[in-house]
Image (cartoon, rainbow, N blue to C red):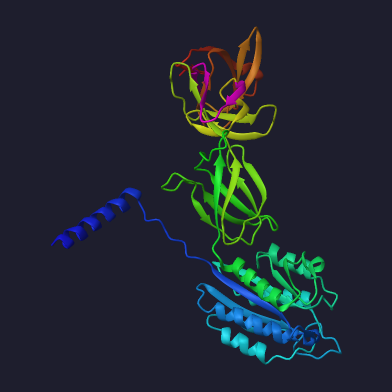
Amino acid sequence: MVRFYLTVFFIIFLGFMVSAQGYIEPVKPKPTTRILFVFDASQSMYGRWQSDTKFNIAVKLFSNILDSLRIQSNLELALRMYGHQKPFPPQDCNDTRLEVPFGKDNINRIKHVLKTTIPKGTTPIAYALSQATHDFPPCDNCRNIVILITDGLEECNGDPCAVSLELQKKGIVLKPFIVGIGKNFREQFECVGTYFDASNEMEFRKALNVIISRALNPTSVQVNLLDIYSKPTETNVNMTFYNNLTGLIQYNFIHSFNTKGLPDTLDIDPLITYDIVVHTLPPVRKDSVRLTPGKHNIVGIDVPQGYLAFKASGNSTLKYLPCIIRKKGSNNTINVQQFDQLEKYLIGSYEAEILCLPRIKVENVEIQQSHTTTVEIPLPGIAVIQKSTNGYGSIYLEDKNQLIWLYNLRDNQQQQETLYLQPGSYRVVFRSKYSNKASYTVEKSFQVVPGQTVNIKLFPN
């Protein structure tokens, strides 16, 4: 009976929580990691290296790595080879083929292909990489990785660096890994991807283990949005993670604190160098952020902020009155803030232009850490211009016997216009579009009083 009541209580509590929140947080599925091994089977792989031929040693050590991957979830493997179909000479620069496509539980098949392959041809690395474009079937939640294993350089006048860059820019693959067997090719391959030198069997085994670890081990990052005191107190702002190489958007996260009051932990791909934009006002950018794979990374970004509010004298609330915000000394608009809106900005000096009539410019608006700066203006009045007909006209401020233009009345079917105007003396000048003589122009002077509405009838009823 006690268990029954506990179950009922839990169901009611869960229903209450769902109702209170309005939804249950969706759980994003982990992406599938797809690794394409591009394996060198050119004739040079038959050369002696340590205890055996380079090809046999590479196959043996690589097979051991494959066996360790059998228990990995969300992982698919494929094998492309080159230099294994046509003997050299003559040179066949199209000698590459996807021998084992992506799929689950295909490790035995990959091992069998490697075991039964005889190296014989040339080294068309660029062409093999370019063909890898077709090896990755469409997938909405996959991360595509290429691991190139080779003992030599490009022999077909291709440009592996350009091909790799194009694959990455198109978002087809992440930055490739390259293992150079028997000789250091770092200078030639660093532009292709992350290079590992395997000068001996031990280094080859170590390189493969490091690459697999980087590709598969979970990596987390904590973004500390720092205030003026270098404390991670800022939050609730969107952060966009861009791929530093391709410029493509990789992630968007609205920053939050966890239940311990610390910046939330994010799971992101460690194989990408990121440019992070924090969408404060104005935005803050931190470029070339590199993560350590398999570790918890902490990234600090300085975004000290304060608040800006507007009010009219007399504690009156105005709505639908826009205010342009600029950095002091700059013509670039940062934001258009509504008068009744509270907004956050980076600390510093700003200028505000309030789009009432006439406009009010406020200089030296200082935003301070966690402080609300309030800009107060005189309480405007409201002028209701009743036209009764369509026509052409304007509103002017009367200033020492001078008319200063403020606003053109709308030439449409609108028979009445309502305007916020600062206290003062004004004049409206108007002519009906159906009058063909300038002498039919009418004008009305009127006074605007704070907090009051004045009706201006241009024509008698």
- Nearer to me, 109 or 453: 109
> Horizontally, is 23 left or right of 4 in the view?
right
- Please say if 164 is above or below 427: below
Magenta residue span: 359-387
**Splitting the image into 4 quarters, where does residue 66 fall?**
bottom right
**Residue 138 is one of the magenta-drawn residues:** no
Q: Position of residue 3 (x, y in %)?
A: 18, 62
Q: Which residue of the protein is positioned furthest toward the left in this rendering?
A: 1
- Nearer to me, 455 or 29: 29
The quarter of the picture where the C terminus appears is top left
Which is the main secondary structure of the residues drawn in magenta?
A: strand
The quarter of the picture where the N terminus appears is bottom left
- Nearer to me, 322 or 58: 58
- Please say if 337 is above or below 87: above
- Please say if 359 is above or below 115: above
- Answer whether residue 316 is visible to the viewer in this image: yes
- Nearer to me, 310 or 223: 223
> Horizontally, is 374 left or right of 407 in the view?
left
> Horizontally, is 201 left or right of 314 in the view?
right
**Splitting the image into 4 quarters, where does residue 95 fall?**
bottom right
Q: Position of residue 64 (x, y in %)?
A: 60, 81
Q: Position of residue 450 (x, y in %)?
A: 48, 14
The residue drawn where x is 24% and y is 57% is 10
Q: Position of residue 5 (x, y in %)?
A: 17, 58
- Answer whether residue 408 is visible to the viewer in this image: no
The residue drawn where x is 66% and y is 72% is 206
The residue drawn where x is 70% and y is 67% is 167
**Residue 368 is one of the magenta-drawn residues:** yes
**Splitting the image into 4 quarters, where does residue 430 fall?**
top right
The residue drawn where x is 48% and y is 12% is 449
